[in-house]
Amino acid sequence: MTAPSTVKLLPGTEAPDFALTDARGETHSLSDYRGKNVVVYFYPKAATPGCTTEACDFRDSLASFKGHGYEVLGVSPDSQEAISSFADDFSLTFPLLADEDHKVALAYGAWGEKLLDGEVVEGIVRSTVVVDPEGKVKLAKYQVAAEGHVSELKTELGL
């Protein structure tokens, strides 16, 4: 299998803008968040064990992120219906965005080959990109673990 060529984002580079629909049908663009720090995290599939752990960790830490001036956006290749159910089932109070054609994940370097149950597949590589108020990449982490990632991110950001 040959995955599309993805380029990992580097600190100091411009974060690609995007416009994606959330669980409620509202469109969010990265440019809507200009002037704020934004955590954009990519997860493979709504309501799976690892993605649920990570999303609930973000939910439980949301006050800390917001208190330090950070917004949180979750992005997956799921449909709007799937992310809506996920948000409702786990009381996720930050925007989850549907990237069904995975173009945003590709632009952010969060799409590619990965090992799943001993098989190489193409899909979301669990990743987090932090964007500064000017729209530049502050931090980019790829192939992160679902469990403990939010805590590590908070430490790295000094929260």
Image (tube, grey):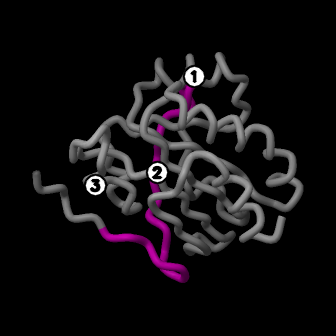
The residues tagged by marks 3 and 2 sit, at their Cα atoms, a distance apart of 10 Å
Where residue 37 sits: x, y (%)?
A: 70, 64
Q: Which residues are magenta?
A: 7-26
Q: Callout 3, which amino acid?
A: Gly
Q: Which mark is residue 86?
A: 1
Other-residue count near label 1 (Cα within 10 Å), few / some / many at <14 / 14–19 / ≥20 = many
Q: Callout 2, which amino acid?
A: Arg
Q: Residue at x 41, y 30 (%)?
A: 78
Q: Judge left or right: residue 112 versus residue 19.
A: left
Q: Residue at x 59, y 31 (%)?
A: 52
Mark 2 lies on a secondary structure that is: loop
The tag earlier along the polypeptide, 3 or 1, is 1
Pick whichever, 108 or 136, lies toward us.
108
The tag earlier along the polypeptide, 3 or 2, is 3
The residue labelled by disc 3 is 112
The residues tagged by marks 3 and 1 sit, at their Cα atoms, a distance apart of 24 Å
Mark 3 lies on a secondary structure that is: strand
Q: Are marks 3 and 2 in contact (CB under 8 Å)?
A: no
Q: Callout 1, which amino acid?
A: Phe
Pick whichever, 17 or 96, lies toward us.
96
The residues tagged by marks 2 and 1 sit, at their Cα atoms, a distance apart of 17 Å
The residue labelled by disc 2 is 126
Q: Judge left or right: residue 81 versus residue 118.
A: right
